[in-house]
Amino acid sequence: MIKAILVFNNHGKPRLSKFYQYFTEDMQQQIIKETFQLVSKRDDNVCNFLEGGSLIGGSDYKLIYRHYATLYFVFCVDSSESELGILDLIQVFVETLDKCFENVCELDLIFHVDKVHYILNELVMGGMVLETNMTEILTRIEEQNKLEKQEDSVVHFNASSNIIVAGLAAAPARAVSAVKNMNIPQQIKDMKLPDLPQAIKDLKF
Amino acid sequence: MALRKVKGNLERMFDKNLTDLVRGIRNNKDNEAKYIAQCIEEIKLELRQDNISVKSNAVAKLTYLQMLGYDISWAGFNIIEVMSSPKFTHKRIGYLAASQSFHQDTELLMLTTNMIRKDLNSQGQYDAGVALSGLACFIGPDLARDLANDIMTLLASTKPYLRKKAVLMMYKVFLRFPEALRPAFPRLREKLEDPDSGVQSAAVNVVCELARKNPKNYLSLAPVFFKLMTTSTNNWMLIKIIKLFGALTPLEPRLGKKLIEPLTNLIHSTSAMSLLYECINTVIAVLISISSGMPNHSASIQLCVQKLRILIEDTDQNLKYLGLLAMSKILRTHPKSVQAHKDLILQCLDDKDESIRLRALDLLYGMVSKKTLMEIVKRLMVHMDKAEGTSYRDELLSKIVQICSQGNYQYITNFEWYVSVLVELTRVEALGRQGSLVAGQLLDVGIRVAAIRPFATRQMALLLDNAHFLASGAGGSSGDGTTTGCGALASSVAEVLHAAAWICGEFSQHLPSPVSTLEAMLRGGRLPSLPGHTQAVFVHNVLKLFAAVMARPKNEGGDPETIDKLSDLLLEKLPYFASSGDLEVQERASSALQIVKLLAQKRKRHREKGKKVGGLLDGMGEETLGEGEGSGGEEDPYTAEFIALFRGELNPVAPKAQKKVQVPDGLDLDAWINDPPSESSESEEEVGENLFGTSERGGLKLFASELYVRGSHHPVSQNLSEEEMQKRREARRLELANNPHYLKGSSKKVNDNSVADIPVAPIELTTPLHIAGLVSSDKYLDLDRKKSSRKGREKKVKGRKKGKRSSREVNNGVSASDDDEVSPMHVVNTDIGEMPEGVEPSEGEEEDSRPSDDPHRALDINLDEPLRDEEKLPVAKHRAGAEEEGGGEGVLVEDGEVQEAVEEEGVKKKGKKSKKKKANKEAEREDGRKRKKGRKKEKVEGDAERLDVGVIKDSIGEPAPESNKASEDIDMWLIRSEQLEVEGEVKKVVSGGKKRGKHKGGGGDDPSSSSANKEATQKRRRSKRKEGAGEVGGGGDEGSKVSSKEGYEEAAGISTPSKEAVSEDAADGGEEWKLCRMRKLAEDKALLLTCEWRGSSILEQGAIAVNAGVVLVNRGAWPLRRLDLNLSESPSVKQLNGPSTMDSLMGEATGLQVQLLPPGASTEIAFSLTVSEPTSPHKLRATLTYILDQGDAGSSHEKLDMWLVVPCSAYLLGPSIVGGQMSEGSFADLLSSGDLGHRRSLSLASSTVHMTFSQVLKMLCACVGGLTLVEQVGDSASLYARSAIGHHVCMLAKASGQPVVLNLDAKSDCDALLVHLLEELRTTLSPHLS
């Protein structure tokens, strides 16, 4: 069983946290903190297994992690998982992210943590490995994204028809909510998006 | 500027989305908390709106905030709202939020049951998929109970994606709702052989998780896993399976033997390191479980160790780590093979990687010997100084203690060295939690090694002298030495002081200056940082020391003046302890105080009395009582009495002794002795636990001093004369000498010798803390080295020592390891400790090591036991209506059908009349059907309907006979593997001349394959059934019903055609029998499916193509549209001309379609399958989906699940091809050629008389297509068949007696084919004959 999957950056800022066992939010933060402290002090050329996380698990549990550029991917697993297998799984996870985001970088994880969760859900379910075949995972993700897009376009259609029905005489509040339906804010931001991330990247990284 | 303003307005008007939130947080790094608080306020507003998009946006933002550590459970209701949105986009957001913030005890989850059920049963597979993913994170007992059934239904989904998720989900259900395990397990087990490898892998995953905690319940699955292991190429699955075997082998050594070979093959062949590693691990587990008796046992170990060495030498740190990890497992049972790689392991000890060092440490304890112990410990001590991080330091310390203390200190040659190591460890900064470990070792060594006591006592006295320094010194590093600053650091030292005080008190005779030690204890005991239980020990041992001082002769400090001074000191200092906050300290101090007071009083009075009697006696007394009991022995009886309090030796108590004390008869421990107290004394109990719990480490449970069994403690009454006392003392000494548990008397003599040999350590002044007198362990290392150079001289001394020791060693069961050339300087008492009388120390109850809240405890369920009736998954009652709309949707509908079946059964029992009535009824129902054989057909259907019920029941729970066999099966499977080789040889010798034998018994002697064996057991079972059916005879309804149920196992309904024997008009003419070949597949109200096999042809590589036709009959009143037959392929059976290979690549089943089927019409779907192993029957899952168009009432989607069995007869070539080629002559030639090496026979008894032999033959040929009649002479006939891949089957049929008994004697060059073919013949024919 996988007990937790954590992704944080070189400064310990969480980028994704998925716990398959219940911990309170405070405890979760402590675990992330402790894990970061354990992992971050290790050189890059030492092994990827780590024991001694006191907050999560106990003696049966291990931390298996990989360090990619600015991000740490940490899986906390028990003895029923194969250590090398989990390392593989991390690789599959990251490669999938890379395919989905096209050259994934930390910013992708920062701004699309929900998508990262959806991707992760195709790999691991309730702490158990669900799928390891990347093409299969990608197909599933794409199909779901397609589904979402379809719904999105339906929403747009409904929204515009709403406006027509409501006409000019309709109450402004209603119009606003209809416009909201159109996801205009997203569109406005979407339009800016191509240059924005690059700018941020240049500024901060 | 203006633009920014406009944008700001827009921003205010439109809610922030997730990206805005993230950006905002990044832009407000300085006041993040404030910004987020503001955002949460906004989110709260958004959540109040009706618009679901706004809500879901808000929930998405909350999910992000949850990751940052904000509790979002207050929005639980809104999350559920978003989850319930019909849109996938929102649903996904909702379920994600739920999975992040809900947990199994979230009360709101009560509201979600129906919503989740709806999602699970949703048409879109991703709706259900998202629901499953979310549910896996927050499912609780209630949800698990309510949804178990729906998830079960998903197990049978046509979509592998959902099946896969549902399988994993079942594990969570089992954890939360253990009652589901038994009813659901058969289904889960089926999934192990699912055509989709992803589903298979998931099922393996689940079973592995289950079996890891309760392996014994899953032993019976071993054959299935074994097959998977040898056939699968999916490394993920293989790893899991191999891990599972690792858990199973300890329970079944025979399994291990069977595993060794395939695993070794994998080790040699695989290139995947992960798989290699797991194989090695399991091989190790196997080798541990079968300690001996394997011929190539050592070869396997060598292989493993070699491979591991390669891993350890690899530059990849990960492999190095894993190599060491696996090595430590070997070490436990095969230390010798690991010791060969000592160089490598010591090298790893210096690795820069802490994880690797830790693993190397694990291995160290197997590396030490008497020679190397000191070196290695020295090395570890150096590490200790360098180590940063408490966890590694803790580990180092416990490893030092472990390697030193292992095997009752068998590797320690010099205990002075060990004591000094322990003392040095005390001085290591930040001892961490290990203080008690060191203390336990000190106590243990002090008690077990009598010879070390003088040295240990001296060292401990030094420690006590400097207690204040140690404690505050440790504290000083963390602050100003204030009480609070001392805290954790000092407490570990306090633990050691606890041991020091006890040793000084108990072995006070070795103290150089008990008075000063006593003073030091009174001083040190008052240190504020000392915990209560340590203080209590201080108080008690002060009293002991006081007694010891009194017991000393006058010239050694026992003079009355000193005693008086001490008692004054005690009276002065003890009240301080008496006012302690700790109850234990208080109590002890008070009683100590009272004793000292009383003693002082009595002494005073006695002295006054003595003065009155006269001064002369005093002088005389002094002369005569020079070295007696105590200073004032005769003149002061109270003193003697006081001293007697602490006299006698303490014996170690076995760890389990306390538990083993038997309750005397008539003592009820649960009964109240007094009236129940109003307020219990809990606080005291706590103290007690604390007190006893501290020193539980080490080989023995070392209770605090007062728990030791005081050896024969005689209360000395006041009027005992000196002579009497002397006598008693003598008696006691005798008693001690005879009691093997008392070691002191004899060992003391040895001590005297060995003490002389011990080099007295010079005082080391350069220790970090500058405590004078504490020795350094390095000294002993140097000494040891020097000593080895003058070994020759030593040897003589050793010889002498050994002679004296030998008897003791035999007693204690210590084997002197002579090969090591280093002799220990001290003797260790290795007794297991005192036990209550009549209790065997060896009997150890294995306690469940799992924590009590581990859900796996509840899953310790026997799965082989047959299911009881009441063991069913709870079904959602209010969904009864779903039966109509849901079509063939698994379990829900089953209930209805089961009921129907029960009704039917009731009707049947009434007799033939009602049977006919029933048939008529059915005939009415199927009005529109054009088939002429109406009545007979119906009969078929009637049976099949019941059969369906059987199928369903089976799929819920296994039928009783099957499950009873489970344990037997595994046994047979294992035994077979053992006998395989032997049998194989025997087989060769006997082969041709094998007796014909009754077919019934043919279970055990078939070596071909494990599947064939399974077949055989089934065969046996079935033949039993048949007998049962025969007994029932005419009213054989029941019997055949049971057998038809049984038949599901392998031929779901197909091989069980109409059992109505011979209808009069059908007796002649093979045409009628042709119908036998139409095997019914499935049916429901609207549809009937039958299947016919139409010969086969050969393809390349031993595979053949089998042609099949499935006839669909619409027997309802409504047209059916879009009938779609889906065959899910298995590894050995694939569709030949399936619509596209793309579909199968995508994991979808291949489909065969019919657009429209009007009422009453029938159509046929023809297809071909490729079978890669055309010697045994294969089973395929098939699903038919269609739309039932009910005119105005609307249309509904229906589904029909079935098993399509490809029988052996389908592999035979058609009679038209074979018939012409085979003449009587060539038949005889074939038989005599000797090519047909396998021979089987079958006899079928017919209960009906009116059937001629030729009729029987016709029936035979008709039922099994491909069988050709070569020649018929009288009551015997020869038959021939050839399979598409060229196997010959020759049969000799003989009929005898009245009623007819048909004896079939068959020969073939393929045993498997023969066995299966005969089996098929029997199942097909027996209903016709009976």
Image: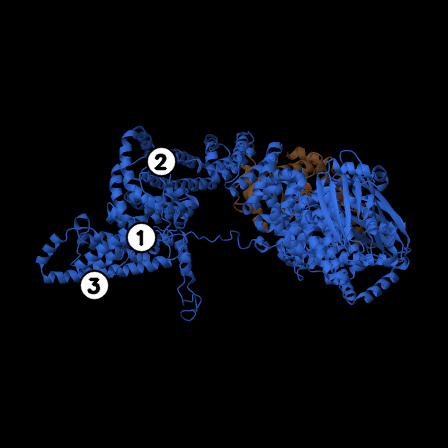
Chain colours: A brown, B blue
How far apart marks 2 and 3 lie (CA) works out to 54 Å
Q: Where does label 3 land, which residue?
A: B718
Left or right, residue B476 beside residue B244: left
Q: Nearer the viewer, mark 2 or mark 3?
A: 2
Secondary structure beneath disc 3? loop
> Which residue type carries mark 2?
Asp
Check if mark 2 and mark 3 are on a common chain: yes
Left or right, residue B353 beside residue A188: left
Please report whichever mark, 3 or 1, sits nearer to the chain's N-terminal start.
Answer: 1
Please report whichever mark, 2 or 1, sits nearer to the chain's N-terminal start.
Answer: 1
Secondary structure beneath disc 2? helix
Q: Where does label 1 land, which residue?
A: B650
Quick one: which residue is furthest to the left in this view?
Answer: B616
Which of the two residues, B1305 or B1218, is positioned nearer the viewer here? Answer: B1305
Image location of residue B1106, percent across then percent down = 81, 41
Left or right, residue B1026 beside residue B648: right
Please report whichever mark, 2 or 3, sits nearer to the chain's N-terminal start.
Answer: 3
Which of the two residues, B262 or B1296, is positioned nearer the viewer here? Answer: B1296
Image location of residue B852, percent across then percent down = 53, 55
Image location of residue B105, percent across then percent down = 62, 57
How far apart marks 2 and 1 lie (CA) works out to 32 Å
Q: Which quadrant, please, contains the C terminus of chain B?
A: bottom right
Q: Residues within 10 Å of mark 1 (few under 14, many from 20)?
A: some
Q: Where does label 2 land, which residue?
A: B818
> Which residue type carries mark 1?
Leu
Image location of residue B424, percent across then percent down = 36, 39
Left or right, residue B818 beside residue B340: left
How far apart marks 3 and 1 lie (CA) works out to 25 Å
Question: Which of the 4 image quarters holds residue B261?
Answer: top right
